[in-house]
Structures are given as C-alpha cells and as structure tokens.
C-alpha cells in the first residue's frame, strides 16, 4: 500500500515540475536571432568617372550564414544616379555578386573626389544594418578626343607661325638654294619644283601632320592626356609642338 502511494506521489511531483518548467519557459522572452556577419567589397569599372559616361559598380557580398530578406541601398553623390540593382537581395549563404550602373546626371566641370555608399539591412523593428561600405572615386570632365585634336592642331599652327617670327627676328631670310642644291632639286622633278615654289606651305603642312600624329601619340586611347584634358592645356600642348622643327617632331613619335 505504501509503495503505491509513493508511486503516485512521484508521478504527481513529476507532472507538477513539468508544468512549472513549461510555464517558466513560455514566460521567458524569446532570444533574438543572431545577425549574420556580412562584408561588402565594391569596385567601380572604370575606377574613375570621366565626362558623363556611366560606370559599372561591382558589389560582392560575403556572409558566414544564410541571409534572407535583406535590402540593398546605394547612396550616390547629388549629381549621380544608381540604377539596375535589386532593392531586395536574393537569399544567399556564402557569396553573392550584384552590379549597378552609376551615371552622372549633371555634374559641374572639374575634378572632384566623391564617394558611393552601399548598405545591406534587414527589416525590423528595429531595422538591422548588416553591413555598409564606402567607395571613393574621382569624377572629372574632359574634352573629347576630336576637340582635343582640333584645338591641338590650331595650337600647332600658332606654334609654327611663332617659329617663323623667331626666324625673322634672327634676321634670317627665306632659303635660297645654292647652284649645287638647285641641280639636286632639278633631279627630284615636279615634287622638288613644287616644294621650291611653295616652301612655307609645304613646311607648314609637314609640321601640321607631324604635330597631329604627336598629339595622337600622347593621347590615352580615346581620351586626351591628363595635362590636356581641358582646352587651355590642349592649346598649350599644340603650341609647344608647333615651335619644334620637323626633325624634333619626329623624335616625339619614337
């Protein structure tokens, strides 16, 4: 009889303890889910923005856990716009690569140091910022390659005229061929005769062609060099080439 009473007592005690522990656990506040560790790597292609040409922003997201329902926000300078990226990132657990297009919308001229901010967050409340990254870049306006060549060629012409003035100031006279030189010139036929009759026109044409070739050689792909990215620099470079002799211009092309 006693053993039965003890057995019932132990069963009741176990039930009571289970009820107490259950109510205690239900009454405890739930622990918030730990946020995944997310890192962002940004790369701008090309790394600097020139004129109003758009650039591609490459974004690499790395996480040590699965990321769900994450929002992406890109903050650009006032005169830029970001497009072509998802506002909500797809679910990822290790690495995710996304792209965005960064386009100038009306920036002033001149080179400036600017920055882009990429931020990944999860909705709340409260909103949790998983990661953010800042990318600095340079924005500059440059004249086009054709305008650079046009202004540079004009500068070459001015430089050539200055070279003629220097000759005049040095009391030089237009070249006169000696008798031996005239005989050699006669052997060249009509070309030699044309050069003799149009010496300055021929000399100027050769200088202009060599100057334009030198301008092309000094350019970077389809962009003017850094020192001639604006019209004053292009004009100065053209003048400096125009005052050189044709032989000196040849050395610029080597």
Image: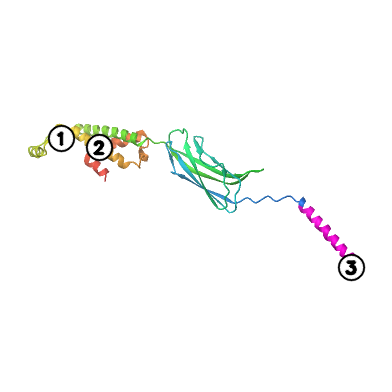
Say which residue appears at 54% left-offset and 43% top-offset. Answer: 118
Q: Label 3's element?
A: helix
Say which residue appears at 85% left-offset and 60% top-offset. Answer: 13
Which one is earlier in the sequence, the residue at label 3 or at label 2? Answer: 3
Distance between mark 2 and mark 1 Cα atoms = 16 Å
Q: Are marks 3 and 1 in contact (CB under 8 Å)?
A: no
Front in this rendered view, residue 199 or 23: 23
Q: Are marks 2 and 1 in contact (CB under 8 Å)?
A: no
Residue 209 is at least partly visible in this image: yes
Q: Quadrant of residue 171?
A: top left
Please identify the quadrant where the N terminus is shown: bottom right
Q: Are marks 3 and 2 in contact (CB under 8 Å)?
A: no
Q: Which residue is mark 1?
A: 195
Residue 225 in picture, x, y percent from top left: 35, 40
Q: Which residue is mark 3?
A: 3
Residue 170 is at least partly visible in this image: no
Q: Is residue 179 left or right of residue 96?
A: left
Q: Main secondary structure of the magenta part?
A: helix
Which one is earlier in the sequence, the residue at label 2 or at label 1? Answer: 1
Local crowd size for mark 1, using a 10 Å CA cut-off: few (<14), some (14–19), many (≥20): some
Q: Label 2's element?
A: helix
Local crowd size for mark 3, using a 10 Å CA cut-off: few (<14), some (14–19), many (≥20): few
- Farthest residue in the right direction? 1
Magenta residues, as a range? 2-25
Distance between mark 3 and mark 1 Cα atoms = 134 Å
Which one is earlier in the sequence, the residue at label 3 or at label 1? Answer: 3
Residue 249 in picture, x, y percent from top left: 25, 41
């Amino acid at each position: 009889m006693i053993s039965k009473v003890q057995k019932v007592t132990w069963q009741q005690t176990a039930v009571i303890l289970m009820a107490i522990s259950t109510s205690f656990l239900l009454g405890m506040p739930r622990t918030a889910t730990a946020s995944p560790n997310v890192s962002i790597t940004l790369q701008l292609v090309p790394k600097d923005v020139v004129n109003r040409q758009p650039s591609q922003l490459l974004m690499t997201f790395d996480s040590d856990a699965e990321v769900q329902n994450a929002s992406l926000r890109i903050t650009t300078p006032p005169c830029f716009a970001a497009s072509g990226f998802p506002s909500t990132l797809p679910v990822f657990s290790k690495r995710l690569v996304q792209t965005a297009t960064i386009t100038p919308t009306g920036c002033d001229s001149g080179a400036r140091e600017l920055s882009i901010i990429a931020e990944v967050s999860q909705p709340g409340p409260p909103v949790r910022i998983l990661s953010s990254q800042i990318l600095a870049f340079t924005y500059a306006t440059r004249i086009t390659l054709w305008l650079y060549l046009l202004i540079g060629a004009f500068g070459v012409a001015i430089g050539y005229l200055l070279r003629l003035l220097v000759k005049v100031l040095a009391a030089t006279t237009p070249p006169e061929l000696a008798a031996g030189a005239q005989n050699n010139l006669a052997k060249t036929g009509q070309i030699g005769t044309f050069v003799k009759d149009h010496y300055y026109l021929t000399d100027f044409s050769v200088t202009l062609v060599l100057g334009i070739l030198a301008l092309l050689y000094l350019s970077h792909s389809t962009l003017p060099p850094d020192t001639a990215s604006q019209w004053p620099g292009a004009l100065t470079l053209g003048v400096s080439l125009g005052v050189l002799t044709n032989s000196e211009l040849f050395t610029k092309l080597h």
